[in-house]
Image (cartoon, coloured by chain):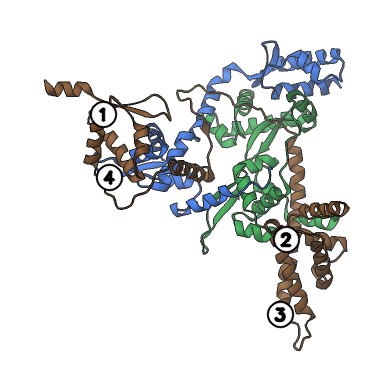
Chain colours: A brown, B blue, C green
Amino acid sequence: MESGELQESYQVRLEIFEGPLDLLLFLIKKRKLNIHDIPIAVITKDYLDYLAKKQNINLNREAEFLLMAAFLIYLKSQMLLPREQPQDDEVSDQRQVLVDKLLEYQKMKITCSLLRQKEEEQQRRWFRPFIPVVPTSEEEEILEVNLFDLAECFYFLMKQKENEDFKVLKGREVSLEKKMQEILDLLERQPVLDFLEYLKQQPSLEEALVAFFCLLELVRARLVIAFQESLFQTIKVWLRREKLIEETK
Amino acid sequence: MSEDIRNIIEALIFVSPEPLSPEKIKEVLADFPEEEIDRALKELQENYGANNRGICLLQSAGGYLFTTRPEFDPWIRRLLQIERKSRLSQAALETLAIIAYHQPITASEIAAIRGVDSTGTIKTLLEKKLIKIVGRRSTPGRPLVYRTTEKFLLYFGLNSLEDLPSEEEIARLLEEKDIEQI
Amino acid sequence: MSEDIRNIIEALIFVSPEPLSPEKIKEVLADFPEEEIDRALKELQENYGANNRGICLLQSAGGYLFTTRPEFDPWIRRLLQIERKSRLSQAALETLAIIAYHQPITASEIAAIRGVDSTGTIKTLLEKKLIKIVGRRSTPGRPLVYRTTEKFLLYFGLNSLEDLPSEEEIARLLEEKDIEQI
């Protein structure tokens, strides 16, 4: 039980760090080391000790910590190898890369603390909570959009389509005339056609689209009446009877 | 001291979504003596009444609220009209998204995807010059075909249509689980 | 005359749903000479700066807006009965700071600086409209490129990106104190 609690507290400790650089910086500060001249062997040991305290590694979150551990071990091993030639440039380069990263990270942390102050002050300011209403003809909500909104909007529209469960049948040619006749035949047999239902029965997206064009064509040719009660509701379709009457006259 | 109360009350009236009653003010400022609050309220009214500022302190529906001066109505309308023009409605956004990703496209194809007739929004987008007519489809009815414009690219800060996030990219971003409630 | 313009501008800022830029003010007040508008704006700033009123005139995100004075936050929260506003998470703040200083920047560049994958955080920041997609890098894979938004400026009360803490300021802090971790 006790050891379980202990384990838990280590668990929490690692969660505190935003990533391997954060942890590394913490260890450097703890030992009061000079960031430009880190003793790799010492810091590698500290780092590994820290990770070792964790019993279960959550790979999702901690892969980056392990990667850093591997990198530190590599650096250390390279530096410990007996050298026949003077200092290996590649190793010192890689070490420099790490130092640069740490410096950049440290700078960013400081920026964060400054931004945090600004956030703090700004959060204590209150804006007027309401936007004045302008009387207009449209009653639509107006928004300011960015590219992400645009892409997201498209994505959800497509998702919606997918969920509507259209099966894609490739290679099947659907002729407009045939489809149009099919709709007219249907309308001869039933007074009102629920067009959304009809679209759902279509075997493919392509055919549904064709059906939709046909409906538009039929409306344009004044053969049928299509009516939609309100947005997002189904479209009801009737045969235009007066047309038929006129023709029989 | 009294000046401080006056300023606090000013701030309270400013953020209150409805006319702020003296009772409510006294409730919030329970630490201050009532007479001081009454005096501060009177001073505030006098201050706002004395000069012909753009913001007026109005006493209405049993409370105080700030409004703009009635004479300035034409200017305000003009401003809000301008603000309105630079924005898009949800319907316009949907239509624009479809055109952006499926261009060239016809009105009925847009309607098929959106599930509603989009003639009105297409017109709005044409007026805003975010889309343009580029010809006709050779299918029956020879419907008009739409494309996005240069202004569209400018609006969203894109260099070319190839810069639009792809479906996979946006899916990846959106399906990324929310790691934290910020 | 100039007093009148000042009052009109005050009313315009009051009703504007977002920071009102000098350009927009000039568009609305096209009938008035620009110098007069500039002068009126300056007077307005001086007026609001001089006294410690409950309402402040803030210049942020390239425009003017009215807010309450920060010190009065406790009273306002008491009136509106809301808890303190929630802050950004550390991950979100780090990612935002990196984007602010390195924009335009890609997701993998952000990850390289932070040392961890940041896709989830980027998504959250996009949803909060603190950052936006502005195109693609022309490197292999053509990754999306991010920038901060106007809302980012407003969130931190900055007028422009130039108001971000400077290199010198950061360097000074680095030397000054060992900022405590976390």
Is there one chain holding both mark 3 and mark 1?
yes
Kind of residue at disc 1: Leu
Q: Position of residue A222 (x, y in %)?
A: 23, 28
The local secondary structure at tag 4 comes to: loop
Q: Quadrant of residue C106?
A: bottom right
- Whichever of callouts 3 and 1 sits on the residue coming sooner in the sequence is 3
Q: Residue furthest left?
A: A249
- Crowd around label 2: few <14 · some 14–19 · many ≥20 (10 Å): some
Q: Position of residue A217 (x, y in %)?
A: 25, 35
Q: Position of residue C45 (x, y in %)?
A: 70, 32
Q: CA distance from mark 3 to mark 1?
A: 83 Å
- List the residue tagged with mark 2: A104
- Whichever of callouts 1 and 2 sits on the residue coming sooner in the sequence is 2
Q: CA distance from mark 2 to mark 3?
A: 22 Å
* Residue in the image at 73% along x and 33% along y: A125
Q: CA distance from mark 2 to mark 4?
A: 55 Å
Could you tell whether B105 is left or right of C163 in the image? left
- Whichever of callouts 2 and 3 sits on the residue coming sooner in the sequence is 3
Q: CA distance from mark 4 to mark 3?
A: 64 Å
Kind of residue at disc 4: Arg
- List the residue tagged with mark 1: A187
- List the residue tagged with mark 4: B137
Q: CA distance from mark 1 to mark 2?
A: 71 Å
Could you tell whether C14 is left or right of A235 in the image? right
